[in-house]
Amino acid sequence: MAMIPTDDLPTPTADVLRRRARAAGLSMNAHIRGELIGLAGRRVPLDAVVEFLDAERPGRHDSGIDADAMAVIRDYDLPAQTWSVLARRAGAAGMPLSAYIRQELITSARRTTVIDVALEMLEVQQANPGVVIDMGAVAAAARYVRAE
């Protein structure tokens, strides 16, 4: 799993992450590293389970760091705090850390933003110069669908 974007993620997920990285002016590795650090820094519903397990069984619910997870930690140079939080969440979910990281990246890509939609339409327009896309209408439609 070390090369997450090309080797293990579904194509639509990799495409969204690739577009986000390009728009941010980052390499794919730097973008995924940022996604994982950001994920670890945000509170998620699973954190309530982590806290409960900490209270009931201190230090006994971390997910094991498998070979795939070690490769991800190394390849993306994840800070100890980041992989520690992710390992605790993976353990609370009853998943290996590598599977949890994969699941969270897929989930992140599925939660598209208006910007993601615009980036995808720009990509279509660049691949097909004859196609004229009203980006304002695209953004308005995306906002409407998202009830924003």
Image: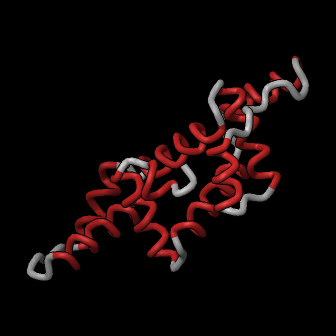
Residue 31, percent from left and from top: 56, 66
The number of numbered badges drawn on the structure is 0
Q: Residue at x 40, y 68 (%)?
A: 19
Does residue 113 appear anywhere in the picture?
no
Left/right placement of residue 85 relative to residue 119 reads right
Query: Is residue 38 shown to the viewer in this render?
Result: yes
Q: Foreground residue, 111 or 147?
A: 111
Residue nearer the viewer, 43 or 25: 25
Q: Residue at x 45, y 75 (%)?
A: 23
Which residue is most to the top?
Answer: 56
What is the x, y in percent for residue 8? 45, 48
Q: Nearer the viewer, residue 80 or 46?
A: 80
Q: Is residue 1 left or right of residue 84?
A: left
Residue drawn at 47 percent across, 46 percent down = 106
Query: In this image, 61 relative to 46: left or right?
Result: right
Name the spot of residue 138 as percent of width and height, x first: 25, 65
Residue at 30% x, 49% y: name it. Answer: 145
x, y percent for residue 126: 22, 79
Residue 2 in which image quadrant: bottom right
| Snapshot quadrant of residue 59 | top right
Image quadrant where residue 34 sits:
bottom right
Colouring used for the render: secondary structure
Residue extending farthest to the left is 130
